[in-house]
Amino acid sequence: MTTGTAAAGPVARITAERVGKWFGEVIAVNNCSLSVGAGVVGLLGANGAGKSTLFKMLAGLIEPSHGQVRVLGARLRDQVGWYRRVGFCPESDALPEWMTGREYLSLMLRLMGFDRAETATRVARWLERFELTAAGDRRLGGYSKGMRQKLKLAQALAHEPEVVFLDEPLNGMDPVSRRAAIDLVRKLGEEGRTVLVSSHILPEVEAMTDRIILIDRGRVLAEGAVAEIRDKIPEHPTTVALVSPAARALAAFLIGHEYVTGVRIEDRQRVVVHTDHAVAFYRALPGWVLENNLQVDEILTLDDNLEAVFQYLTER
Amino acid sequence: MHESDLSPADDPGTGKMPTPLPGLPAAGWIAWFSLREMARRKRLVSLGLINLLPVLVVLAVRLWFADRGITAHLQLAGLTHDTFIPFLIPIVAMAVGVSAIGEQIEEGTIVYTWTRPVRRWTIYLGRLLAAQGVAGGLLSLSLVLCFLVMVAGRPGVISWDFLKLYLQTFVIIILGTLTYTALFAAMGTFFKKPVLPALLFAFGWEKLVAGIPARVQELSLQFHLQNLVSRPQSVPEDLPGMLAAILNTAMHREPVPTWQSALVLVLVAAAATVLGVWLLRNKEIEK
């Protein structure tokens, strides 16, 4: 279990304290604690990692087997009035097939408490925003997966909530819509809203935020910025590129050295080093360079991305 | 709602406590949209056809047995007692009731109303009212068609007594529909696959208990509904009629006061609704 507030802004709007959920003998979420403030935070994990279950507990759809969750300081499951300030986009594709997009969005907004005129304005604005105006009067049964996804996003955002839960929001979207949705999510974060967005596709999360919560087999593995998470891992495999005018000499020195598991030369001036003790390698490198008169102009960390962190943590 | 209510600057503890929407308007909205959803279901066609059964019976009697002395009065009471109450009401209420809440939970669309600032009872009540409206509408339509077939071209049939019986039948059928639908909606909320338990209740428990002598019969809804129907007393002259009369006597099918049956039905409907709301409040929305 990881406990921390690395993903939280000044004030935590979403908190989970030692939350767990069992379905019979299956543990879906195990002792998770997290704290999320303003901005966008990615909930990252493979399929079946427990992301959706955690989302549903946070959004008040299911009751934790133990622990407690709070959104804006409230227990949504009991204090339903707080849903005025919360938006939820489920992973499930289910929509009322018989309704038109316009009717559906209208109902969602009327149930948020907007009057007829305000509802109509917002419906028009959000259909336009997701390029669904032309399809607004068509039945949802005839919508493509991407269109359904956009409408699900629209219902979660049209009342301009402070806290937004987006469970795999980009599923089924075409690249252009995906780009637009990513920009929208980033904008929501910039406006000071809290957006917790889940995905199992790492580049998606990276495009939206660098603040992540990693979850695997129902446990929070790490929480914080990608770089911070890497720092928390004392030993992890890393690929480093060293730019040197004397690449051959540098490579010869590094081969067989402590912490180095592989070396190859690229483009004559780049030595790509694989290490399974990244922190120790970084610590030792300046000493090796000085003591052995090696030339290193630049150090590039090639896999300081979410994919590498995620793979490392989940395969550990 | 004003924009200021949604200011992202509000942090926990600093924003005012948002109140849920007023219950009845929210239930009304949900009922209206649910009614339109349920009215478009394909199964409504087959239910409509089943509901033509009593109309066909009335038509057949009028066409081929007009000279047997079967009055409209007798037909209506017979149909209510032997077709609507034991067969049509449970079938229609079951088909509409078990899916009223259960289907939304099962397919996952309840998530959208669940994450609005509306109290759980309003979601339940809205869906239940819609289901009761659809079921009641179907059965009422059948009853209206029966009436039209009975009286068309026979103005003499329309007497005060007949109209009274017709209105009484209408009320009984609506009461039965409300009660059965409330019960099946609660079953649909509780069971993941509610059709079998609902069938066992409607055509197992109800028939079995209704057939047990003495006061055990009172444990079935069917008994109370049938008890509300005032059947014109006819002296059985044929063998089946006499056997039925002997059977009724042997089984002590004694009527209880009308108010008692009506109260039982209303209480069962209310209890089932309260139970359904409680079940929904504690439901886990897993999809």
Image: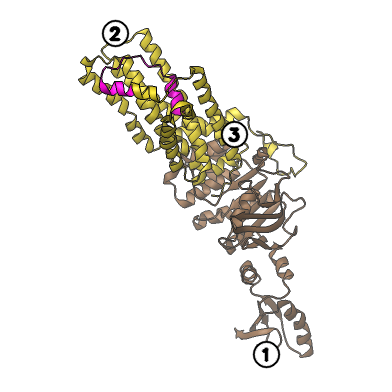
Q: Is residue B82 above or below residue A28?
A: above
Part of the protein shown in magenta: B221-244
The color chain B is rendered in? yellow
**Tag 2: amino acid:** Gly
Q: Taking the image as drawn, is residue A184 in sight?
A: no
From the viewer's perspective, tell me whether residue B223 is left or right of residue A85: left
Secondary element under disc 1, as helix, strand or loop, is loop
- Chain under numbered label 1: A
Using the numbered discs, state the Cα–Cα distance from disc 2 to disc 1 in whole angstroms.
Answer: 112 Å
Residue tagged by mark 1?
A256
Decide if residue A298 is in sight here: yes
Q: In front here: B263 or A203?
A: B263
Q: Kindly identify which residue carries mark 3.
A: B121
Q: Amino acid at mark 3?
A: Trp
The nearer-to-camera label among 3 and 1 is 3
**Amino acid type of the residue that numbered disc 1 sits on in the rendered structure:** Gly
Q: CB under 8 Å between callouts 3 and 1? A: no
The residue identified by callout 2 is B156
Q: Colour of chain A?
A: brown
CA distance separating discs 3 and 1: 70 Å
A44 falls in the magenta region: no
**Callout 3: chain:** B
Residue B232 magenta-highlighted? yes
